[in-house]
Image (cartoon, rainbow, N blue to C red):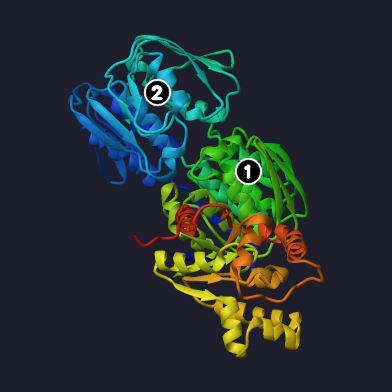
Amino acid sequence: MKTTKIIPLPKPIDAVVSIPGSKSYTNRALLMAALVGKTVRIKNPLLSDDTRAMIDCLQALGIKVVSKGGDLEVAGDIRSVADKSYDLNAHLSGTTIRFILALASVVAGEKTIRGEGRLNERPIGDLVDALRQLGAKIDYLEKEGFPPVRVSSSKLTSGNIKMNGSVSSQFLSAILMIAPVVGEVNIEVIGEQISKPYVDMTIDSMKQFGVEVEVRHSNTYGVPAGRKYDVDAYVVEGDASSASYFFAIAALTESRITLKNMNPKSVQADMGFLKILADMGNAVEYGENQISIQGKGIKPVDVNMQDCPDQVQTLAALSACVPGTTHIAGVGSLRVKETERVAALERELAKMGIRSESTPDTMTIYGGYPKPAVIDTYWDHRMAMAFAVLGAKLEGMEIRNPEVVTKTFPDFWEKLNAIGIKTGTSERDPNIVLIGMPGSGKTTVARLLAKRLGKRCEDIDSLVAKKAGMSIKEIVEKFGWDHFRDLESDMVREVSEQNGAVISTGGGIITRSENIETVKKNGLCIFLRATLRILLERMEEDDSHRPAVTTAATPQEEMEKRLADRAGLYEAAADETIDTESAPPEHAVEQIVAKLQERGVVIRK
């Protein structure tokens, strides 16, 4: 696994950064260009994993997309799409799978549309329901409401749609963009409409392609019959989402950064992040095709980010660095993104010693003085870039799987280097550290997991006993528990220097915070959890007879007291929690493997 270490800025800077084209505008332009019916040149496009996914799907349908001198030429007519079977893979791109699903409803053939990884776990039911109201024939191939799907319709009929607006604005955008080839389409959004600026972006793009969307009231949209896309060339403006990380760096380090290729009047959703920084006291200046920010520092805020959810992670990271409470509302849509972003944020902030809590639609960060940490990205590009911002000021920050930024900002790390934030990438295979009470299954699961992953298995208790030349019981009886804990901490430091080991720890390792800090420098902590009843049953079968830690009169009282003292410590240290209550240890191993894959750890087949 690759890890990038970030070297902070030694002092505030005055720098200029050229921002790449917008992913959101590029994917919208690609879809609409395919509907024009003649060659369209897209200038300043973003070439990233997400836009390549869109290009791949269009090309699979027979639409030609050619790179010319940094531009893209789209040529083809959807009416010429052959009547045959197609397998369209959106990979990990949410915009692609939503937009292509709508497009697939108006082209010939039987189209199977799927994604990869977590994309197939992101809901798509509201878009399918809306398309069905216009006559689309769409079947779910696995789980109801989720990809993959099969589309067998080749045209839609004019009509009225009522659709839920609370899951994703991309559903509405997808139907609006195909409306000109359908006929008259009227869409009423029911309930709360989230991320409305992204819909405004779609309307802006359609206007530049020659089609006006009629906005009636705040929740009804119409595209009259007879409208047609007609454009020869289209220029993609700079990506406000990409720019936001540099805006955040300026605020955090009190630097001045000018972002080139930025439209000061852009309707992109993440322009709202600039207002949040301005409200903190940072100075924002708008020029011709550029925006500058003079950082003045950061403050706790109370904001609703429903309209710019992609910058919640950046604001949460910034908030960790300022004493006080930051409250962010409107985070519900983050729970169905590349990862469960709110949960991921809480885990990574906890690594840094920052407490946070959440409800289904809010997140609260109790900022202060964060410690550097090795950040897991969960294959989420925005996790990588948001926490990389902290590396501009906090020494010791490292980002696992730094290559995930290719999803939307392929040269992100190079841009950081260019303004003086140096980075170094190395191959580091994280240790897998099992923590939990005696009887939770650590030793057995560690042995099986090491075999499954092809890694070394290290047992802290066994290593301490071997080095001391006596059993743990003998060590404690002769020298006392404090001496054993000292030996244990020494062994923790020694074993943690390894790469790629599966480490089984003693139940009491958690009682010293420095032990957890040590193992987390290059390790993921997996808490094996079981109830008191199960722990007692397993310990009765164990003939090791370790000495008591407390003065309890019975083994049950002893275990009850230990569990009461340690349960919260295990939960706080855990990167992941696995219940070992009733499932066999082999099942726990596969659960751990699945969690590691989510975090980007490469698993041997």
The N terminus lies in quadrant: bottom left
Counting every numbered tag in the picture gives 2
The location of residue 373, given as percent across then percent down, is: 61, 64
User: Of circles 1 and 2, which is in front?
Assistant: 2
Residue located 43% across and 20% down the image: 129
Kind of residue at disc 1: Glu
Choose the circle earlier in sequence order: 1 or 2: 2
Q: Secondary structure at mark 1?
A: strand
Left or right: 470, with 114 as reference point:
right
Q: Is residue 283 above or below residue 233?
A: below
Which one is nearer the viewer's eye here, 303 or 97? 97
Q: Which residue is mark 2?
A: 177
Residue located 63% across and 60% down the image: 537
Which one is nearer the viewer's eye here, 591 or 410? 591
Kind of residue at disc 2: Met
The location of residue 231, given as percent across then percent down, is: 32, 25
Q: Is residue 78 above or below residue 452?
A: above
The location of residue 277, given as percent across then percent down, is: 67, 44
The location of residue 347, given as percent across then percent down, is: 62, 54
Label 1 crowd bin: few (<14), some (14–19), many (20+), radius 10 Å: few
Left or right: 469, with 56 as reference point:
right
Q: Which residue is mark 1?
A: 285
Q: Is residue 350 visible?
A: yes
Q: Is residue 46 visible?
A: no
